[in-house]
Structure formats: structure tokens, C-alpha cells
Amino acid sequence: MITTQILQTPIFTTVVPSDHMELSRLLSAAVVNPQFKSLLLVDPESALENGYLGESFRLADDQRALLISIRTDTLTDLARQLSKVLVSDRVFCGFTVEH
């Protein structure tokens, strides 16, 4: 007799608010492509203008200004600074943050 065993593995997902989806796409492109990451860190305005593999990033004006204003040497620090500002704007993952 053959027995079967069903394994269930939990799947974890992160829900990104639609207004942050473009930032998420941008950071994802930087994670998978070292050249794009370098351009994003050195010259974020050019990275936004050139896009990645034919894809453009349609950031809101305030997100674009924020991204261009951040100067850092690492993608981790860039993401941290973006997150810090977005959380300080009292919006985190689509929910209002109460202080």
C-alpha cells in the first residue's frame, strides 16, 4: 500500500500599498541588478529617467523628490531612509500610525 503525505508550508507575503508599489519595483530592480543599483545610489535622477530594462518608474512627485534628495552608499540605507520618512508621514503599509 502506498501512502501519501501532504506537507503544508505557510506562505508569507508583504502587502505594499499601491502608492508605494513603484518604490517597491524600483528597489527590487536595484536588488537584482548591480549596475542599476550603482546608478540609483550615485545618480538617482538618471536611474529614474533611464528606467530598468525598458521599464519606467512612475513615482509621485513627492516620492521622486525624496528619492533624489537621499545620499547614501548602500541600498539598505536608502531603503531605511525612505521607510523612515514614509513612516514619519504617519502612513505605514496602508494604515495610519498612531503616535
Image (cartoon, rainbow, N blue to C red):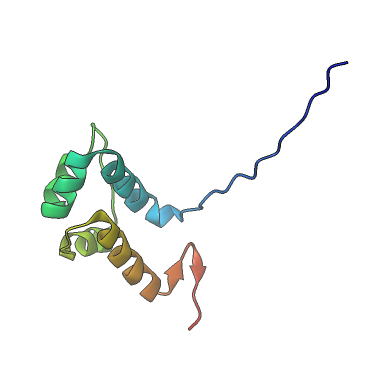
In the rendered image, the residue lying farthest to the bottom is: 99
Where does the image place residue 53, in percent across and percent down from the top left? 23, 32
The vertical placement of 15 against 4, above or below, is below
Where does the image place residue 86, in percent across and percent down from the top left? 36, 68
Q: Residue at x 29, y 42 (%)?
A: 29
**Quadrant of the rendered structure where residue 25 is?**
top left
The vertical placement of 15 against 90, above or below, is above
Where does the image place residue 38, in percent across and percent down from the top left? 16, 47
Does residue 13 appear anywhere in the picture? yes
Q: Residue at x 64, y 45 (%)?
A: 10
Q: Which residue is drawn at 46% across and 54% down?
A: 16
Q: In this view, does 23 lie to the left or right of 92?
A: left
Count up the numbered dots: 0
Q: Nearer the viewer, residue 97 or 27?
A: 27
In the rendered image, the residue lying farthest to the front is: 1
Q: Which of 83 and 2 is in front in this view?
A: 2
Does residue 89 appear anywhere in the picture? no
The vertical placement of 11 against 87, above or below, is above
| Location of the N terminus (image quadrant) | top right
In the rendered image, the residue lying farthest to the top is: 1
Q: Residue at x 15, y 40 (%)?
A: 50
Q: Which of 7 and 47 is in front in this view?
A: 7
Where does the image place residue 35, in percent across and percent down from the top left? 17, 40
